[in-house]
Image: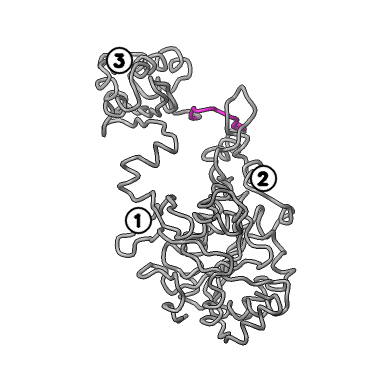
């Protein structure tokens, strides 16, 4: 479709997705992170919020600016800002008749709609996929939910932990002598987001070729299940139910966390090549010829690993710092310091990859946040963008995409539709 992109403040110049209009009716992370990826790549993303019940992630810490005082608007959520950068802010109350008609009008000019409500919610509001595709047969309608649009669990409420629990990941994480532990980030939300981006781009390509849009249905439970590596085939082929392994791999050894003088490192020198190099680098070349340790298969044996290999690694690492160990390993063998987030933010490799970006919020100060891991040579992602205030661009968006004049906007405001 053709739009007056220059009229939509915030549309990114030169992005791969420039000209793609995305209606973002999402909250918290799973939906907003999906549309943020599209915005970073140049799409015009319009974040639609209820004027009386906006995205409650706007209240999530940490907060930029202010001192926690009572002045309204004195703070801005850095959490919200990171996941909603480069978007335009529009308010619509979809419970009103005028709001429903306004969304239909916008859908006619849009390429993508992303929502992360419980299945059936948009249908109940009268603006579900079957309704909107009649307005625009080319529309790609991306729905992210806990359990998907089909199946017996489809109406169940879900959070990230719900997906980790029902997708099998929680049961596998942690240590064998302790209760299972959740993965230390919202992997259910984030994995669903990334699959939603992939599905959206695939559906867009199909729509561009055929003029036919489609429903992109992504479940957090499905997404988590796909991250369980060899667990499914271990069960279906051998009848094994994988449990928590701590920092160990199911069969590859050595391949885990090891203590050192000032913390921990990951060491993965398990192949014959890497083992031989490691023995040389750490001053024990004779161990590469040791008949108990000279093949990968022997080192994989649990008894040999515990009796011989682990003590050797302890001797190599215990009196050296993370930095010293990384310097010894260099570019030769896989050894990495386990860094905390403060160390990661200041890491020179992260800086070289432009993975910590800074933006200035005029009223609140500077925000440093993660950048985009997608590196494109000709049309790079542009993660340095601001997140909108509630409804900040309502007038501009409605004037440009819905042909609403000043009187029409005044009427919509008076009715509470925007």
Task: Tell me which residue sits at (71%, 79%) in the image.
Answer: 415
Magenta segment: does it hold 248? yes
* Residue 241: image location, x then y, percent: 62, 32
Q: SS class of the residue under badge 3?
A: helix
The residue tagged 1 is 375
* Residue 268: image location, x then y, percent: 38, 29
Tell me the CA gap for discs 1 and 3: 42 Å
Magenta segment: does it hold 418? no
Point out the tag, 3 or 2, that comes first from the N-terminus: 2
Q: Would you say the magenta stretch is mainly helix, strand or loop?
A: loop
Q: Tell us which disc is closer to us: 3 or 2.
A: 2
Tell me the CA gap for discs 3 and 2: 47 Å
Residue 28 in which image quadrant: bottom right
- Compared to 124, does 224 lie above or below? above
Q: SS class of the residue under badge 2?
A: helix
* Residue 77: image location, x then y, percent: 55, 53
Magenta segment, which residues? 240-249
Residue 258 in which image quadrant: top left
Task: Tell me which residue sits at (28%, 23%) in the image.
Answer: 276
- Compared to 90, does 401 lie above or below? below
The residue tagged 2 is 162
Q: How is the image coloured?
A: one colour
Q: SS class of the residue under badge 1?
A: loop
Tell me the CA gap for discs 1 and 2: 32 Å
Q: Are marks 1 and 2 in contact (CB under 8 Å)?
A: no
Task: Tell me which residue sits at (61%, 53%) in the image.
Answer: 59
The residue tagged 3 is 287
Point out the tag, 1 or 2, that comes first from the N-terminus: 2
């Amino acid at each position: 479709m053709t739009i007056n992109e220059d009229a939509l403040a915030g549309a990114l110049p030169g992005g791969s997705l420039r000209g793609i209009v995305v209606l973002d009716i999402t909250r918290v992370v799973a939906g907003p992170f999906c549309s943020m990826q599209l915005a970073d790549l140049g799409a015009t993303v319009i974040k639609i919020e209820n004027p009386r019940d906006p995205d409650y992630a706007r209240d999530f810490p940490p907060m930029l600016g202010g001192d926690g005082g009572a002045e309204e608007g004195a703070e801005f959520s850095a959490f919200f800002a990171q996941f909603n950068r480069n978007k335009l802010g529009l308010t619509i109350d979809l419970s009103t008749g005028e709001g429903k008609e306004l969304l239909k009008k916008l859908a006619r000019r849009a390429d993508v709609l992303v929502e992360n409500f419980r299945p059936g919610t948009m249908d109940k509001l009268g603006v579900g996929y079957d309704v909107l595709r009649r307005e625009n047969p080319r529309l790609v309608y991306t729905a992210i939910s806990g359990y998907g649009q089909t199946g017996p669990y489809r109406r169940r409420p879900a959070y990230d932990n719900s997906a980790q629990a029902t997708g099998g990941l929680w049961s596998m994480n942690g240590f064998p002598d302790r209760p299972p532990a959740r993965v230390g980030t919202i992997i259910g939300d984030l994995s669903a987001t990334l699959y939603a981006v992939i599905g959206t781009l695939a559906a867009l390509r199909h729509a561009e070729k055929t003029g036919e849009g489609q429903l992109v249905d992504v479940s957090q439970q499905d997404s988590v299940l796909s991250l369980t590596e060899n667990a499914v085939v271990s069960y279906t082929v051998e009848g094994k139910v994988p449990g928590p392994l701590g920092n160990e791999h199911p069969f590859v050894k050595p391949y885990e966390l090891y203590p050192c003088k000032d913390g921990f490192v990951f060491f993965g020198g398990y192949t014959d090549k890497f083992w031989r190099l490691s023995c040389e680098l750490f001053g024990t070349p004779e161990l590469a010829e040791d008949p108990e340790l000279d093949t990968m298969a022997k080192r994989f044996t649990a008894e040999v690993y515990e009796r011989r290999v682990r003590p050797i690694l302890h001797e190599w690492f215990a009196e050296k710092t993370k930095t010293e160990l990384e310097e010894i390993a260099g570019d030769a063998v896989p050894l990495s310091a386990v860094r905390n987030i403060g160390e990661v933010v200041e890491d020179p490799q992260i800086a070289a990859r432009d993975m910590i970006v800074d933006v200035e919020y005029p009223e609140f100060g500077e925000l440093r946040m993660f950048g985009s891991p997608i590196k494109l040579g000709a049309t790079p992602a542009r993660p340095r963008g601001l997140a909108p205030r509630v409804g900040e661009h309502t007038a501009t968006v409605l004037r440009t995409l819905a042909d609403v004049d000043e009187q029409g906007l005044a009427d919509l405001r008076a009715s509470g539709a925007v």
